Image: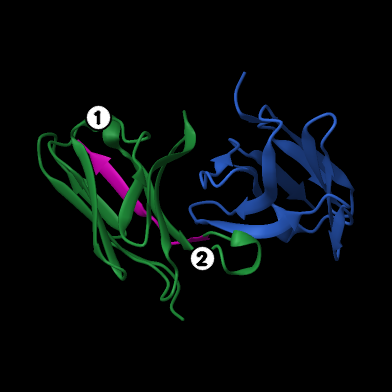
Chain colours: A blue, B green
Amino acid sequence: RKEVEQDPGPFNVPEGATVAFNCTYSNSASQSFFWYRQDCRKEPKLLMSVYSSGNEDGRFTAQLNRASQYISLLIRDSKLSDSATYLCVVEPSGGSYIPTFGRGTSLIVHP
Amino acid sequence: DAGVIQSPRHEVTEMGQEVTLRCKPISGHDYLFWYRQTMMRGLELLIYFNNNVPIDDSGMPEDRFSAKMPNASFSTLKIQPSEPRDSAVYFCASSSPRSKRETQYFGPGTRLLVL
């Protein structure tokens, strides 16, 4: 089983739609969780951290389910500019600072 | 701050040639990472440094790859000799654990094509 798994998609949705991505991780001792966004031919950029209590940033909501070992990203009212690849990132605990990136989920928002 | 700087942005070379990729991390960041991204394998961590010291190079594919960080503001990733399967986008990233949530900041990447 891969350490971090994501559905590659693509998720093809119309503007205004709500879309959700999940990411599962295998290391139950994982400590920190993030969502990164990567536009075509660009570098990954941090979208948001994922806190245990869940967190929201505008149209974006991230949640963590430690019992089932997955994190989720919900995008409401999708915009054309949301089209990108969304990467899930998991970092272990215990001082080992080696982040593991998922392969990413591709989102295409069309008019 | 200019962010993480990488050079060159594009590199086309022939098999067998030496390739050197360069990275300047964000000032004050004490962690530096080298990643490789391909369609087949996604984003792979090759090596990372803490305070200029290599901490984990288990992701380096083979002896043809080497990385150095002679000072806090400069790192190189060298491939010698290069092979067509090394074609990928190579990203450098830096971070400081003392910063909020240990965010990694990526450079724009170097697109390498080995013919």
Q: Residue furthest bottom?
A: B1
Magenta span of residues: B105-115
State the CA–CA distance, disc 1 to disc 2. 28 Å
Amino acid type indicated by mark 2: Ser
Q: Is residue A11 magenta?
A: no
Instruction: Provide the chain ID for the residue under circle 2.
Output: B
Nearer to me, B22 or A69: A69
Instruction: Provide the chain ID for the residue under circle 1.
Output: B
Element on which disc 1 rests? loop
x and y percentages locating residue B82 in the rendered image? 17, 36
- In terms of image quadrants, where is residue B46? top left
Element on which disc 2 rests? loop
Q: Residue at x 89, y 48 (%)?
A: A18
Check residue A76 in the rendering and tell me which mark sits there, or answer none: none
Q: Which residue is under mark 1? A: B62
Give the mark count.
Answer: 2
